[in-house]
Image: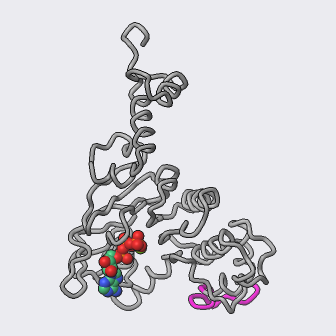
Amino acid sequence: MIEVKNIKKVFGDKTIIEDVSSVMKAGQCNLIIGASGSGKTVLMKCMVGLFEPNEGEVLYSGESFTAMTGSDKTEIRKQIGMLFQGSALFDSQTVEQNVMFPLNMFTKDSYKEKLRRVNEVLERVNLVGANKKFPSEVSGCMKKRVALARAIVLNPKYLFCDEPNSGLDPQTSLVIDRLIKEITIEYNITTVINTHDMNSVMEIGNSILYMYQGNKEWEGTNKEIIFSKNERLNEFIFASQFLQDAKDMRMLEETGKISGDRNMEELLDKDAPILIPPPNEE
Ligand SMILES: Nc1ncnc2c1ncn2[C@@H]1O[C@H](COP(=O)(O)OP(=O)(O)OP(=O)(O)O)[C@@H](O)[C@H]1O
Ligand SMILES: [Mg+2]
């Protein structure tokens, strides 16, 4: 579990994060969503210690990471896996070398042991046999999976993914989302994901923090989003009229006022009257 308590981050005279608190639980994907520039990456960097917050603290499993120094901080860092925006692979290194990098940095394991672990995680992300390929030789989806393999190679308790789907088509994004979700559950990882991919929100958003201009505007699950009356959130998530209609329909379905197929037809028929059937039909 990760707790963020009253985080504030200022750059010069610009307050980027004003006052954000949240709890991110183990075994689930904790999403941070919000418009470009709302402070998602800055918040994530404060959480992993790449930025020092001006105020507030971050706790890992109840221990204040912010107050830690030296070897204690290094211990937590070893438990953190990070999937950077754009994958951030070393272009001049093979897939195997990229994934082995954290093992070289943080362990004294023999080459044989390290290779065994590399092959284990490559298998987990469905990349068996890709060891000797270079990043330029593999697809965007494979690059993300290499980056994910590298992020989990040290068996992290905490996994941070900054825009894991950027540059991927919707179906490939789903493959990556599902893989992250499976791994999160399988190893009981506290996973934090920055995204503005609405498919991800609906697919894996057990817990969603919506950032608006440096503040937490809304928090809840993907199911609760359907019922949320928060106008800023609704404008952000259901930006198009099509999605707004889909939300309205889903709300009615969920509240049991309509039955699927018939009302789907009605919704598609612009001249159809009202969606709610008369009482004797319920
Ligand atoms: N190192 C920095 N120095 C000064 N300002 C910064 C720094 N890093 C980020 N910012 C500013 O903080 C604000 C929030 O940036 P951030 O990258 O967190 O947004 P974001 O929500 O992740 O956006 P995106 O969806 O585009 O990734 C931006 O106005 C950005 O210019
Ligand atoms: Mg960002």
Residue 146 sits in quarter:
bottom right
Outermost residue on the top side: it is 280
Res 42 visible: no
Horizontal side, residue 13 vs residue 133: left or right: left
- Depth order, front residue of 268/133: 268
Q: Quadrant of the C terminus?
A: top left
Front residue (pair 111, 253): 253
Vertical arrangement, residue 229 with respect to residue 158, above or below: above
Which residue is at a point 73% across and 89% down the rendered structure image?
111
The spot of residue 53 in percent (x, y) is: 27, 81
Q: Where is ligand 2, by quadrant?
A: bottom left
Q: Is residue 32 above or below residue 263?
A: below
Task: Locate residue 60: give its quadrant.
Answer: bottom left
Which region is colored magenta? 102-113
- In the displayed structure, does residue 53 sit left or right of residue 258? left
* x and y, in percent, of residue 109 in the image: 67, 88
Residue 162 is situated, as x and y percent measured from the top left of the image, at: 47, 72
